Amino acid sequence: MGKEEKQFDELSPNVQANGYRVVGTRPVRPDGIEKVTGKANFGADCELPGMLTGVVVRSPHAHAKILSIDTTRAMKLKGVKAVVTSADFPEIGPKQRGAGEAPVSFRDMSRNVMARDKALYDGHTVAAVAATTPAIAEKAASLIEVKYKVLPYVLDAREAMKSKAPVLHKDVFTKGVDPRPKKASNVTQRFEFGMGDIDAGFAEADVIVDHDFTAQCVHQGYIEPHACVANTTQDGMATVWCSTQGQFMVRNYCATVCGMDISKVRVLPAEIGGGFGGKTVVYLEPLAIVLSQKAGKPVKVVMNREDVFRATGPTSGGHAYCRIGAKKDGTLVAGELTMEYEAGAFAGSPVHLGCMTGFAPYVIPNSKSVGFDVVVNRPKAAAYRAPGAPVAAFAVESALDLLAKKLNMDPIALREKNAATEGTKAAYGPKFQKIGYVETLEAAKNHPHYSAPLGPNQGRGVASGFWFNIGGESSAAVHVNEDGTVEVVTANPDIGGSRASMGIMAAEVLGIDVSRVKPLITDTASSAYSALTGGSRVTFAVGQMVCVACDKVIVQLRERAAKIWDVEVDDVEWVAGSAVNRKSGKGETLSLAEIANVAGKTGGPISGQSSSDVQGAGPGFGTHICDVEVDPETGRSTVIRYTAIQDVGTAIHPSYVEGQLQGGAAQGIGWALNEEYIYDANGCLENGGFLDYRMPVASDLPMIDTVVVEVPNPNHRFGVRGVGEVPIVPPLAAVANAVSAAADVRMADLPISPPRLLAAIDGK
Amino acid sequence: MGKEEKQFDELSPNVQANGYRVVGTRPVRPDGIEKVTGKANFGADCELPGMLTGVVVRSPHAHAKILSIDTTRAMKLKGVKAVVTSADFPEIGPKQRGAGEAPVSFRDMSRNVMARDKALYDGHTVAAVAATTPAIAEKAASLIEVKYKVLPYVLDAREAMKSKAPVLHKDVFTKGVDPRPKKASNVTQRFEFGMGDIDAGFAEADVIVDHDFTAQCVHQGYIEPHACVANTTQDGMATVWCSTQGQFMVRNYCATVCGMDISKVRVLPAEIGGGFGGKTVVYLEPLAIVLSQKAGKPVKVVMNREDVFRATGPTSGGHAYCRIGAKKDGTLVAGELTMEYEAGAFAGSPVHLGCMTGFAPYVIPNSKSVGFDVVVNRPKAAAYRAPGAPVAAFAVESALDLLAKKLNMDPIALREKNAATEGTKAAYGPKFQKIGYVETLEAAKNHPHYSAPLGPNQGRGVASGFWFNIGGESSAAVHVNEDGTVEVVTANPDIGGSRASMGIMAAEVLGIDVSRVKPLITDTASSAYSALTGGSRVTFAVGQMVCVACDKVIVQLRERAAKIWDVEVDDVEWVAGSAVNRKSGKGETLSLAEIANVAGKTGGPISGQSSSDVQGAGPGFGTHICDVEVDPETGRSTVIRYTAIQDVGTAIHPSYVEGQLQGGAAQGIGWALNEEYIYDANGCLENGGFLDYRMPVASDLPMIDTVVVEVPNPNHRFGVRGVGEVPIVPPLAAVANAVSAAADVRMADLPISPPRLLAAIDGK
């Protein structure tokens, strides 16, 4: 991000110690120029002969019963080829599971894609139309007559939990409460994680801090709006091009929502202009499929920015209460965290992940985290980098800041004293294997930033963050071409540089130059299943499959060499990209290219494929240091220096890793200082655009410094942990702690916008 | 072809005997409607943002030295983004081999794609231009100034062999002649195949017949002209969409002609509107790539019909001399065949294949076949169904007709007496395994057609034909979806129904319903290497890989079932689409869908891949019966009844097999009666369009009856031999023999057009 590729950068001690040739270097980004110039083919760039334009009709009400939809006038308009409403989709029952036991409610998904009896938020889809031109489609959309009965709405989690709040779903009864309530509620579920006895723990404490915190729902803010083209054929097949984080996810979800066999849907992922978790669900794709089926033509549907803000998943905002007890020396003895997250219109906020992550970085013998998933009249929440963790960390890391002040302890020293290490049993369950949290704290302590002097109205904040990182179902294939170049094929859209990391790992395993390796991304029909790009899983899990597929290729290369030399395969060793004949005693070699050139005559194509449910992801920890200057006159906070430190295991391509750290920090700073949805008195969004919904841009931020710590994950061939999510976890608290220090007033409600800070300063 | 799908047709004895569930049935064609309505996405249907139109500048001379090319005026035209000439392509030396030891001359290919110092035929590409609109591109093409020195030309093989003929290439010296001549020649190579001693053989003969024959170059006549789009990116990658029989062929050829790594080219095959061998080479693709590289934009290039006729490969025409000696009882004792084939502008007619196939159906102890590959000022010949065989069979099967008449023997009985069977050593080398030639002769003899009465001016002809069928490098992958539907992925464009045959074979092996199997075709990046669709190899060889991939899937399905039941994998049997627990004694079963649904929890994706150089293709034989009525007033011949009989091994989807037999017969009838290139006095093509180049259409032909004989190929799991090429081999002779009988004059020169037949009748 803004930093030049450091092609000839010094290699890290980890990379040097392991003697990697390619891992840890910085080859030129394979798709960099095309992505930044927009020449790459994104979701809206697909064109097909005879293609129609689809336009979506959205609810203008935050909460309304749909009394009737009359499409007659729209259908009569010349050029209109199809109109769809909920009547065109199969009704999905509350207990219907999707194929492959997908852990989602397809009933909710179906009703989010197309409102059935009620519109549950401003922007909720109620119909869609396809026509020969965009203008006709827009006109037709305006001719669809929807009669609503407007209902009272609720936007805030704590408001929605009140007994007199309007209830969104008559058939939702809080799960996780014993006995299960018989009255419908906006609380869909209560979660609890913990260990020990918190009452006993707090009784032991010498010092206790507690505070309430609020964070707003924020949008993922990807540059590229959702876009797709669906083309259906008379054999019942649907082909979908779209901007997504997971083509197999789109395939499964579309098949279920549209009532089709999975084999009847082929999904081709476009280049993706950002997702950050927001493209892990379907919005337009099922509409485009059914419009295309009805019209008998390909249909393109593209959101505008306002659609994106009104109708696609933000991450959950909500409320948190955090209480921490410690001994005088700083030893933590008890922690309590209670959170209410706004799920949007349907169940499924990541509050349980917040509960699992909040105290995860620390050894706290007695802890309890309770979470409530609350539906409100907002678009259904979607994933966003480390879903659920940033708000939990905001509460816990702010509370630790309060504790450090109360103990008069250095905030890093307080964290070091209590940091989880190898063998620590995390409050959410597992015992940590080798982790690098302490190493990030040490790097922070020793970083010049931490000891740099501060000026007037400036403050420094520190916060840490944790994310699980995940593995999961992954597939890869490696094909050797006739000239000895190699295709590395995966089925995960490249969001954060996975082409580069796959290519590097393949080159390392095969022993060839990275320029001879071409990483490519393919569609659902052309690859074995792979779970979506998310959870910081791709370089770890899919990368593991690339390595295994390369191993299989090497076996074949050795077999071919053995055949050529007429020796046993065990007599052939693979060294630095060549087969070596250990039998003859003369050390003959055959390079990969030489073997590839005669593959057609020694048995045919050389190719390796690997699929597995990859286990062993390495948890990631980060520690951020933030300096802020506040303007006491205006309440404006300016980040003047920022350092993001993270244990990434091994950085396969350090430039991408640094970019992830910078990007996550920038998004977290936006969440802390500026971003929020503004609704009018009717619950309708007022700031659905990047001019009014204020994400930080380059000119708002200093250069974000990064420190890549490498404590290799023992479960990955090259030690990869996963990178992309941890860096958004610490910034909310790091910024809030910095502003609180600079303004000398605790800022516990986000965003810390100028009016809010000014009010706090004035209220001192 | 014109016949309704016989969904509930009776199964063949072979299919019944083997107890196949799916093989041999007639499921609805997966892509039928889309292909015939044109909704399928063919080569010209790809659109990309910012795409330019490419137009090709072609030589107006049959043979000319290119003195200079001035592109200045064209480049100055507003909207012109790139112009290319031979200067933009690497010069390829005569000995430069392509990667993977591709058995082609890349020097010739490069010079056929773009003329370097000479234009060698009317229509030869000399430059190309890309501009923002088709009109600007056409205008720019007209502004490119090429100065030529026109040279004398030659179009006919025997003319070109004369010592005073204009020589096309100064550096071509006839191969296969000892000592190799030192004078440049249009004869690029002499081939010879045979066995025994033909002088001794003819000395033994009681009866000898001999005759000269001529056949014209004919075009493959695919409906869809060549078309492609190339998009290049700044990382040096080229992505090509095109209408081709082989995406890997296009990749390799483009990489070599453009001087790129193979991994830098990704080729996505469009749906193909016919190829018949004519799309086994590249014409436009390298031009589009280099235009795109120079322009920095995607470029589409599409041929019009005249381009197709002027510049793409016809099959070779030529001359043949055939002499056959027999005993009085009809036993063949000697055969001699000499052929000169027109290769077009560069070496490489299929005359050697003609030499290998002509006598292949027969036991002839003494035979010799000699072939000459001759360059002439026509477009370079390309493959066309059973390349080289139809002209050879025309000569041999016409000579056998003469012999039968001379011996006063039934022509089928003559063939039966001498037919090759299992164990016969073919003159071209191998000993036949199980083959079904005799069975086709018996079916012909017993067919009602053969004994039906003939009217006045009607004649009946019989002829047989042989084709090797091939295997070769092939790959397939089979992926089990979450809902238990299955993707069968191959990388061979579906020309003759391979989607259907792959799906059927996969369903048979897996034991599931064919509707649960989705066959799909993918691109070069997404599959291991597979040789192109041709040689009647796909259902045989790629199908074999599909079966092996399914076997691998079944192993995994059994492993998962074993895991679920906590038994050994050997305790689990796969029966009729389900795992059966043989350990428990209760016969529990788990269906494929049940196992698929929990795959994510039992180890991850279930997927099988297979690649091999597949051996063991089964040779194919066909016998055709043709009735013709001639109009002695006009010379017009009308085919009034036609029966095509062929041993196909096993017909996986009989409707497609019947369609192949009908299509091959129709094309052969056109070759026999109507098709020819007409050149003006300057060697320029006069009939470059389907109105003037007369292929038979539905109204020209009777319903072509088919008899599918099944003598299973022992080297394929379901006995497949290959189907698509044999049926074009017999018709030339079958028609000529029928016309000769009807008109009572030997017609030995094709096409038997009305003026030629009238002249023959008048000359009697």
Image: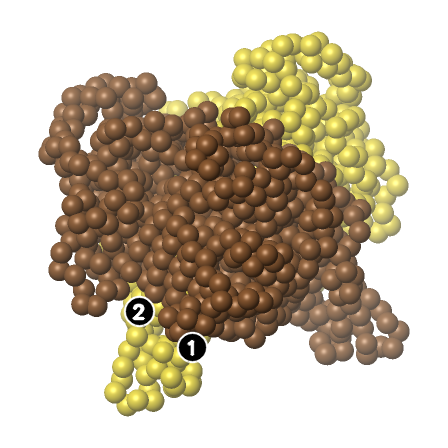
Chain colours: A brown, B yellow
x and y, in percent, of residue B430 in the image: 61, 66
x and y, in percent, of residue A448 in the image: 74, 48
x and y, in percent, of residue B492 in the image: 50, 50
Q: Residue at x 50, y 61 (%)?
A: A468
The kind of residue on which mark 1 rests is Glu
Query: Up-down: is A130 above or below B425?
Result: above
The kind of residue on which mark 2 rests is Glu
Q: Are marks 1 and 2 on the same chain?
A: yes
Image quadrant where one finds the N terminus of chain A: top right
Quadrant location of residue A32? top right
Q: Is residue A350 left or right of residue A505?
A: left
Residue B156 visible in the displayed image? no
User: Dot 2, crowdedness within 10 Å: few (<14), some or many (≥20)?
Assistant: some
Residues A242 and B659: in front is A242
x and y, in percent, of residue B144 in the image: 69, 13
Query: Up-down: is A280 above or below B717?
Result: above
Q: Residue at x 59, y 61 (%)?
A: A414
Please give the residue where the numbered disc 2 appears in the rendered image.
B594
Q: Secondary structure at mark 1?
A: helix
Residue B76 visible in the displayed image? yes
Quadrant location of residue A64? top left
Residues B682 and B281: in front is B281
Q: CA distance from mark 1 to mark 2?
A: 14 Å
Q: Is residue A296 left or right of residue A67?
A: right
Question: Mark number for residue A13?
Answer: none
Residues A130 and A466: in front is A466
Q: Residue at x 70, y 46 (%)?
A: A449
**Numbered disc 2: what chain?**
B
Please give the residue where the numbered disc 1 appears in the rendered image.
B559
User: Dot 1, crowdedness within 10 Å: few (<14), some or many (≥20)?
Assistant: many
**Of callouts 1 and 2, the N-terminal one:** 1
